[in-house]
Each structure stands twice: as C-alpha cells, then as structure tokens.
Amino acid sequence: METVQKTNYWVWYALAATIAAVIWVNASDGVEPENPVPERRFTNAGRVKNILPEHRDKFSIIGLPRARIESQPQPLFEDKGKAAAIQHAADQIAKPQVPSLPFTYVGKLIEDGRYTIFLLSGERSFAVHEGELIEDAWRVKEIRPPEMTFLYLPLKAKAVLDIGESK
C-alpha cells in the first residue's frame, strides 16, 4: 500500500506573502544608498518599468503608497496602573522603617528628681535612665511623663512610649 502525501500549498503562499511583506517594509523604511539605482518593476502589461529613487515613496509593492514609520513602538500589553502599583510597593519595601518598640512599660521610680523607668522586653527586664543605650539599637533620648522618647540608632528615628503621668 502506498501513502500519498498531500501538499498544503496555502502554507507556501503564506510564506511567500510574509517574505514579500518583510521586503516591502525594509525597502520602504531603509536608508537610501549613496548611488541609487532605479528599481525595476513589472507593469500590468508585463513590461519593465524603471522607478527613480525620488519617486519611490509614491509606489509600493502593491501599488499603494505607505507612510513611513517614524515613531518608536509602544508596549501593547503594559498596564500603567499595575506598573505604578508595583513601583509603589517596591518603594515601600525599599524604605527601611522603624520597628515597633520591643519594650513594655512596667513602672517608674523618681529619686532626687531623676527618673528610673522599668521596662520588659520578652523575658528580659531593664531599669533605664535618660541617655542610656538598650540592646545596642535603642537610646533613651528623653523621659518627660507622660511620654518617654527613644532614638532608634540604625535609622536615627524617634519612637515614643506612653509611661503615664507622674504623681
């Protein structure tokens, strides 16, 4: 038994049309050579017609004029709103932020007009005065009831803890 292979001529026609379109675009937008040679084209009567370079823009492969492509192509599928949201999220991630205070206020003691504040951080406890450094990252900047101000040293940013009124 012999198998007969069927040729799909439409594929060949499509390939030829694609090649012709590429040549057309390339010829229409290309840089003019230094020594232009007239193009040779066939007319409907089958005769060859020479087209001078200065008249090339008036003709094209199918006989219709085509405007030159002068602008840069723009992205087809870019969503500007989504791109802005992604950029905003990236900016938020990139900015370092002051972490929340790791301390819980326990109480205060006043001796000779100087405050001693008692704090908890997890299972650790601290008795601090104004100007002291805690865990190499937090400095007690100011104690003025009802607030205590810390300076987060890596970012040089302030954080405030409520310590209540003094009696």
Image (cartoon, rainbow, N blue to C red):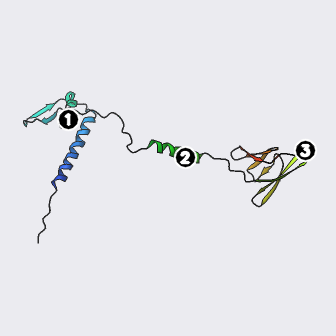
Return the residue at label 1. 60
Look at label 2 and name its amino acid: Ala
Look at discs 3 and 2 and give the one toward the viewer. Answer: 3
Look at discs 1 and 3 and give the one toward the viewer. Answer: 3
Residue 4 rendering spot, x and y as whole percentages: 12, 65
Between discs 1 and 3, the one toward the N terminus = 1
Look at discs 1 and 2 and give the one toward the viewer. Answer: 2
Residue 117 rendering spot, x and y as whole percentages: 83, 51
Q: Quadrant of residue 43?
A: top left
Q: Quadrant of residue 58?
A: top left
| SS category of the residue bearing label 2 | helix
Question: Residue at position x 69%, y 50% from top?
Answer: 100
Q: Is residue 148 left or right of residue 11?
A: right
Residue most extreme to the right: 112
CB within 8 Å, label 1 to label 2: no
Question: Residue at position x 78%, y 56% from top?
Answer: 120
CB within 8 Å, label 1 to label 3: no
Residue 136 rendering spot, x and y as whole percentages: 75, 52
Pick whichever, 24 or 149, lies toward us: 149
Look at label 1 and name its amino acid: Ser
Return the residue at label 2. 90
Question: Residue at position x 15%, y 58% from top?
Answer: 7
| SS category of the residue bearing label 1 | loop
Look at label 3 and name its amino acid: Gly
| SS category of the residue bearing label 3 | loop
Question: Residue at position x 68%, y 45% from top?
Answer: 155
Return the residue at label 3. 113
Q: Is residue 120 above or below residue 84?
A: below
The image quadrant where one finds the N terminus is bottom left
Between discs 3 and 2, the one toward the N terminus = 2
Between discs 1 and 2, the one toward the N terminus = 1
Q: Give neighbour class at mark 3: few <14, some 14-19, many 20+ (Cα, 10 Å).
A: few
